Amino acid sequence: TVELEIEDKLKVLFTSKGDVLVAVVIDVFQELGAKAIPGEPGRDDVIVEFEGKHAVIEVKGKKSSAAESDAAQLEKWVAGFKEEKGTDPKGILLIDAYCETPLAERIETAFPHQMLKYSTQREHCLITTTQLLGLLLEARAHPEKRVDLVNSLFSTIGLFQQFSDWHKFLTAPAPVPAKAK
């Protein structure tokens, strides 16, 4: 496990939303050896190319869980990419669910049951940003696994199962004792 004192840049993966989160996601995919670029403003968040495969990634930092509307938005970007480029990209929905809640206090599921059928039918990969952090840390620790780890995102349909328990790769710092009165 790694102490939560990881690079501040990586803390963004489980504490943020918006452009700052998208920028770090791009950096992570680039470190993993993929070509990752921002999508067109107001459209797909990230376009990834890895070993001849393409992915369209919708990145969301949310106060709550993912929603079917997030998956529908991703599907719209996937269809647009296919229409423009003539090739089928992998749709990846990357969520920092409950981003305003401390990691240790997150108990709700990031992807509610009602959206799973929709995303599975469309062969989306549903992954949290914390799982992406686990994948990155595993690739750093075992560079020989990097290609297989990235390819696992392209082969996953529905919920990404690896790195679901952040306690296995991160440890929270010990609480600071309250000052004596």
Image (cartoon, helix red, strand yellow):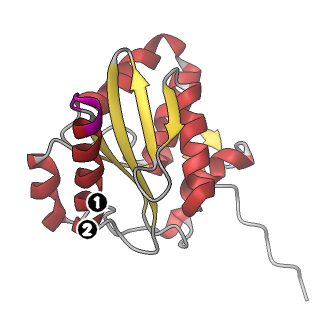
Can residue 122 be seen in this snapshot?
Answer: yes
Where is residue 128? Give x, y as percent. Answer: 40, 51
Marks 2 and 1 sit apart, C-alpha to C-alpha, by 6 Å
Q: Cβ–Cβ below 8 Å for labels 2 and 1?
A: yes
Residue farthest along the top direction in this orientation: 144
Residue farthest along the bottom direction in this orientation: 181
Residue in the foreground of this view, choosing between 131 and 178: 131
Q: Residue at x 30, y 63 (%)?
A: 70
Q: Residue at x 40, y 40 (%)?
A: 163
Task: Kindly identify the amino acid type of the residue bearing the numbered disc 2.
Answer: Ser
Task: Kindly identify the amino acid type of the residue bearing the numbered disc 1.
Answer: Gln
Q: Residue at x 31, y 27 (%)?
A: 152
Q: Residue at x 63, y 39 (%)?
A: 2
Q: Is residue 150 left or right of residue 89?
A: right
Can residue 125 be seen in this snapshot?
Answer: no
Quarter of the C terminus within the rendering: bottom right
Where is residue 60? Give x, y as percent. Answer: 44, 60
What residue does disc 2 label?
A: 69
Stretch in magenta: 84-88
- The vertical placement of 166 against 154, above or below, is below
Where is residue 111? Give x, y as percent. Answer: 27, 61
Using the image, tell me which numbered label, if any, was put on residue 73.
1
Say what secondary structure mark 1 lies in: helix
